[in-house]
Image: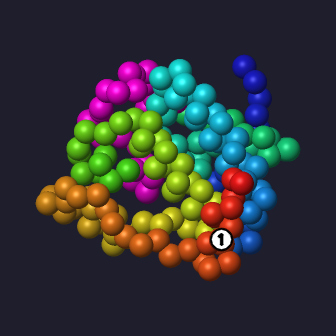
Amino acid sequence: MEYVGKTSLHSFLKNKSNRQLTEQEARTIFTQICSGISYCHSKHIVHRDIKLENILLDDYNNIKIIDFGFSICIDPEKKLNVFCGTPSYMAPEIVAKLYYKGAAADVWALGILLYAMLCGRFPFRGLILQLIFYNQKFKKVLMRKIYIQKSRKESLIFLFM
């Protein structure tokens, strides 16, 4: 077993100004996370609980993805209907209790993760989550314009160029 350290991405962000990473830090960390999740997906493994707390960092900001408790090995074309994960990171189809593709749900969670790293907060919180979880008629994909600070908007476009 390998020792990684005790710093989660969540703790790392809490110690940053405005709980935000610089664009360079976000690029370095997020690229590693995407690489790890891409590898899992290439082996037909979906994580289903990607979140700040499940990413560990060492002293050089190298990441390890942890907590594969919800993960499963599945045919990429097969759809799931299991309600699992962390609410702030769940894709709309999971919340709506519709069938969903596991890899696509992981990619949604990656987007939430990137947003949190760059903006210092989650795109969907409070009332929005309450409406989603307690509105039994919710069957459509959540449509909400996400406001990103103007200075970071262009950076998101060029983040991986």
On the question of residue 119 being in view, the answer is yes
Q: Residue furthest front?
A: 161
Can you give x and y, in whole percent of width and height, for residue 63 in the image? Answer: 72, 40
Tell me if residue 69 is in the magenta stretch: yes
Residue 135 occupies which quadrant of the picture? Answer: bottom left
Q: Is residue 137 left or right of residue 7?
A: left
Start-end of magenta stretch: 68-90
Q: How is the image coloured?
A: rainbow
- The 10 Å Cα crowd at callout 1, few under 14, some 14 to 19, many 20 or more, is few
Can you give x and y, in whole percent of width and height, for residue 42 in the image? Answer: 54, 25
Q: Kindly state the secondary structure of the residue where label 1 is placed.
A: helix
Q: Residue furthest bottom?
A: 150
Q: Disc 1 marks which residue?
A: 154
Can you give x and y, in whole percent of width and height, for residue 125 in the image? Answer: 42, 67
Can you give x and y, in whole percent of width and height, for residue 140 in the image? Answer: 23, 58
Q: Residue at x 62, y 80 (%)?
A: 150
Quarter of the image that includes the N terminus:
top right
What secondary structure is the stretch in magenta mostly built from? loop
